[in-house]
């Protein structure tokens, strides 16, 4: 049997995309995806280090661990934790370069942050299916057919939901520009 670290790296390389698609399709919030993904592969590494025999089906092995991580993550305590909104500042620390340039940069960052927050709020208010579609299409760069397959939807349904969501975001952005 291979060294645990090498075995893990090989398993990770072969299963990361499938695991990410699975986790994305099952998450209750797109903001949870990264945490569950990392937790999944941390547990895969721990399991690989403690293994005594070969893994027959690596993808099934990883997906099974992802299922357990999802279950743990969305347990009663996690659901209560999810109710509490933790705001993380996205503004970088102020640099010591020219005062005027720094003020202009901060102003642009504040405007960009406000727009990002508005878009995130709009997307967060949409159904979980739409959030997943947006995440899979724009963040994971999956084709619409693969998104539909992962979510159990037809490609035309995925397109329809995506385009309606984008139109809603455009309307919000136009309203904001008029203010």
Image (tube, helix red, strand yellow):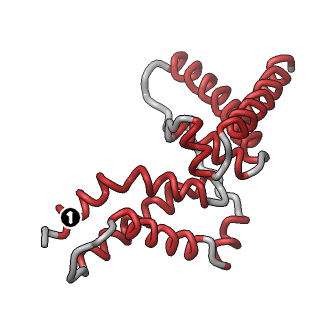
Q: Please tell me whether residue 140 is drawn above or below residue 171 in the rendered image.
A: below
- Res 172 → quadrant: top right
Q: Secondary structure at mark 1?
A: helix
Question: Relative to the observer, which residue lies in front, 118 or 23?
Answer: 23
Query: Percent from the top left, x then y, of residue 166?
Result: 73, 30
* Label 1, residues with CA under 10 Å away: few <14, some 14-19, many ≥20: some
Q: Is residue 10 left or right of residue 145?
A: left
Horizontal placement of 93 versus 2: left or right? right
147, 172: nearer the viewer: 147
Q: Nearer the viewer, residue 52 or 154?
A: 154
Q: Mark 1 sits on what residue?
A: 7
Q: Looking at the picture, how far across and down is residue 174, in whole percent?
A: 81, 20
Apparent side of residue 175 relative to residue 133 in the rendered image (left or right): right
Residue in the image at 30% along x and 69% along y: 45
Residue at 60% over, 60% down: 26
Quadrant occupied by the C terminus: top right
Residue found at x 50% / y 55%: 34
In the rendered image of this protein, does residue 6 appear above or below residue 164?
A: below
């Amino acid at each position: 049997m291979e060294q645990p670290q090498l075995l893990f790296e090989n398993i990770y390389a072969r299963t990361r995309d499938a695991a990410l698609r699975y986790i994305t399709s099952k998450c209750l919030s797109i903001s949870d995806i990264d945490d569950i993904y990392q937790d999944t592969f941390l547990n895969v590494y721990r399991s690989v280090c403690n293994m005594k025999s070969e893994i027959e089906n690596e993808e099934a092995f990883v997906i099974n661990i992802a299922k357990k991580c999802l279950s743990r993550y969305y347990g009663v305590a996690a659901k209560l934790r999810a109710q509490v909104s933790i705001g993380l500042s996205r503004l970088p620390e102020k640099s010591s370069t020219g005062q005027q340039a720094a003020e202009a940069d901060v102003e642009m960052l504040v405007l960009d942050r406000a727009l990002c927050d508005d878009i995130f709020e709009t997307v967060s208010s949409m159904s979980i299916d739409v959030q997943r579609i947006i995440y899979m299409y724009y963040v994971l760069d999956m084709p619409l057919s693969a998104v539909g397959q992962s979510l159990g939807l037809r490609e035309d349904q995925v397109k329809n939901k995506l385009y309606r969501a984008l139109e809603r975001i455009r309307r919000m952005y136009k309203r904001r520009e008029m203010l």
